[in-house]
Amino acid sequence: MRYLAWTIKLVVFVFVVLFAYKNTAPVEVVFFDGILWSDVPLIVVMLVTFAVGGLLGVVIMLPSTWRGRREAGRLKKDLNKVQSLVSQSKTTATVTDSTPL
């Protein structure tokens, strides 16, 4: 499944790069408050927009990723506690079972 996801990502990236390569005409980029950036190749605008979108997606996913890792760490600690209690109870049960009546 991991290879399929990376293959899809690679195909999308190659498609964006080829699409941008075919659209190299100069364009004007108007930012807020009338800030103008003129004669910028469209390929630059498209690749920067693609990169910013990817970074924004990563930043948006970070809190849920951190929450999941924190939860996994907590669950591992709980599992270790339960396993140690089970092993202690087995040891205690073995010792008490081996004593003669």
Image (tube, grey):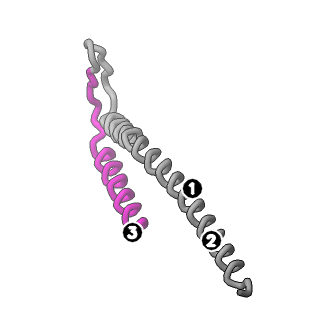
Marker disc for residue 77 = 1
Quadrant in which residue 24 is drawn:
top left
Q: Main secondary structure of the magenta part?
A: helix
Does 28 sit above or below residue 22? Answer: above
**Around disc 3, counting alpha carbons within 10 Å, would you say few (fewer than 14), some (14 to 19), or many (20 or more)?**
few
64 or 54, which is in the foreground? 64
Separation of residues labelled 1 and 3 (CA atoms) = 29 Å
Q: What amino acid is at disc 2?
A: Ser
**Around disc 2, counting alpha carbons within 10 Å, would you say few (fewer than 14), some (14 to 19), or many (20 or more)?**
few
Quadrant in which residue 2 is drawn:
bottom left
Quadrant in which residue 50 is drawn:
top left
Residue behind mark 3: 1
- At mark 3, the secondary structure is loop
Q: Are marks 2 and 3 in contact (CB under 8 Å)?
A: no
Residue at figure coordinates x 46%, y 45% from the top left: 66
Residue 46 in view: yes
Q: Which of the two discs, 2 and 3, labels the residue nearer the N terminus?
A: 3
From which residue to which does the magenta span run? 1-30
Q: What amino acid is at disc 3?
A: Met
Does 41 sit above or below residue 96? Answer: above
94 or 100, which is in the foreground? 100
Residue behind mark 2: 89
Residue 5 x, y percent position in the rendering: 37, 62
Does 84 sit above or below residue 33? Answer: below
Q: Are marks 1 and 2 in contact (CB under 8 Å)?
A: no
In magenta segment, residue 18: yes
Residue 93 x, y percent position in the rendering: 64, 77
Q: What amino acid is at disc 1?
A: Lys
**Around disc 1, counting alpha carbons within 10 Å, would you say few (fewer than 14), some (14 to 19), or many (20 or more)?**
few
Residue at figure coordinates x 39%, y 58% from the top left: 10
14 or 25, which is in the foreground? 14
